[in-house]
Image (tube, rainbow, N blue to C red):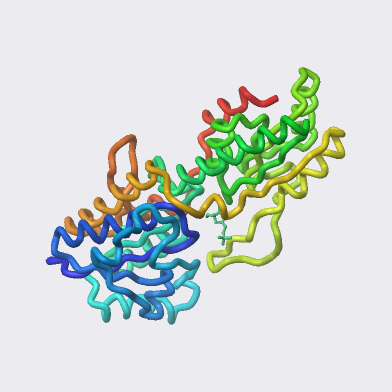
Amino acid sequence: MTIKKIGVLTGGGDCPGLNPTIRAITWKAKQEGIKVTGIKNGWQGLIKKDTMELDLDSVSGILPKGGTILGTSRTNPYKQKKDTEKVKHNFSSLKLDALIAIGGDDTLGVASKLSKEGIKVVGVPKTIDNDLSCTDFTFGFDTAVNIATEALDRLHTTAESHHRIMVVEIMGRHAGWIATYAGIAGGADMILVPEVPVDLDEVCGIIKKRHARGKHFSIVVVSEGAKLRKGLVVKGAKKDAFGHVLLGGIAQQIGPEIEKRTGFETRVTVLGHIQRGGAPSAFDRVLATRYGVKAVELVLSGKFGTMVALKGNDIVSVPIEDAVGTLKTLDMDLYEIARIFFG
Ligand code: F6P
């Protein structure tokens, strides 16, 4: 089958690296004589037929820019049958020969279902959380780790000057990847992650031990999805279209409690969406570019239902259905390395 026109969309939470991927897809497609239709705001654009044509002019200058020129949303077309039908109908009416879906577990979960229903899809993995299976890294993660590490460096100097405990909340809904990488790189004295529920007394014990050896400041990194033995802290009952509750608030909750139990002055910082905004790191720009080029190659070789992935230093393809559903949780060997430096 000759490929004349492909669609591309970005879905789920944005992350640095989306624009370099869109740029790479557009350039590679141009080289192969293929037209590219950008679908706006994730699956919502395919439901509403909201699109823009992509050419070398429209992707000019976007390589160093965060976010996505296509816009994004957390739309789930499988929530309502009529939306699923619209997606399939519009795929044909736009005369797309294939679709490249750039997203995390939710967006690619939809791509996997559509692929089983006959839509020709190739997936590209992205998320700052790095929790997608079948790939060593998603783009966006390296940038988030760099931002969080810089924040930890800055918090160190003020913590040390004021002899304070700094509790720093870092993104990562279900996995402690960002917290652990940034915690190791930024010299955290304790890292709390969703994969390892802890007792607050244990945390306070470590801080007290530090003070006893003459260290009158501590940096406690906490993943937004970290679990205390008494349970998960959520902001409210609000859920997104994929059923995820809005997390956040754990640092605000444990900060005052740590101060109470240790007697040491404590401050709380929530990094939030700062970790997702701004320019992608060089690593993410290169990874995103390699993913974009490979995605077009997979389309050309008819390997639909697959996702590009990083294995070691190679860009490979894996079935999308193997990548979605089961999240890639933190490598416990890495957490054990981080643990050596606690206290
Ligand atoms: O999945 C990426 C992520 O940034 C998570 O780390 C975080 O929990 C969530 O998205 C935040 O979602 P929103 O942008 O909808 O607030």
Q: Judge left or right: residue 174 versus residue 320.
A: right
Q: Kindly indicate the quadrant of the structure image that contains residue 68.
A: bottom left
Please tell me whether residue 47 is drawn above or below residue 234 in the rendered image: below
Residue positioned 83% across, 38% down in the render? 259
Looking at the image, which residue is at 51% across and 46% down?
144
> In the depicted view, which residue is nearer to us: 225 or 252?
252
Q: Is residue 293 above or below residue 283?
A: below
Quadrant of the snapshot with the N terminus: bottom left
Give x and y (percent) for residue 287: 34, 45
Question: In the rendering, at what x and y percent does residue 201 appear?
Answer: 80, 34
Residue 181 falls left or right of residue 223 = left
Please, which residue is most extreme toward the top here?
Answer: 213
Q: Quadrant of ligand 1?
A: bottom right
Location of residue 244 (image quadrant)? bottom right
Q: Is residue 339 left or right of residue 165?
A: left
What residue is rendered at 57% in x and 66% in y?
Answer: 240
Q: Using residue 157 as the reference point, say whether residue 2 is left or right of it.
A: left
Report x, y in % for residue 248: 67, 54
How many circles with numbers are drawn on the protein? 0
- The answer to whether residue 24 is above or below residue 186 is below
Q: Residue at x 36, y 47 (%)?
A: 285
Measured from the top left, where is residue 93 in percent x and y?
Answer: 27, 81
Of 56 and 100, which appears nearest the observer? 56
Q: 122 and 30: which one is in front?
A: 30
- Which quadrant would the C terminus be assigned to in this image? top right
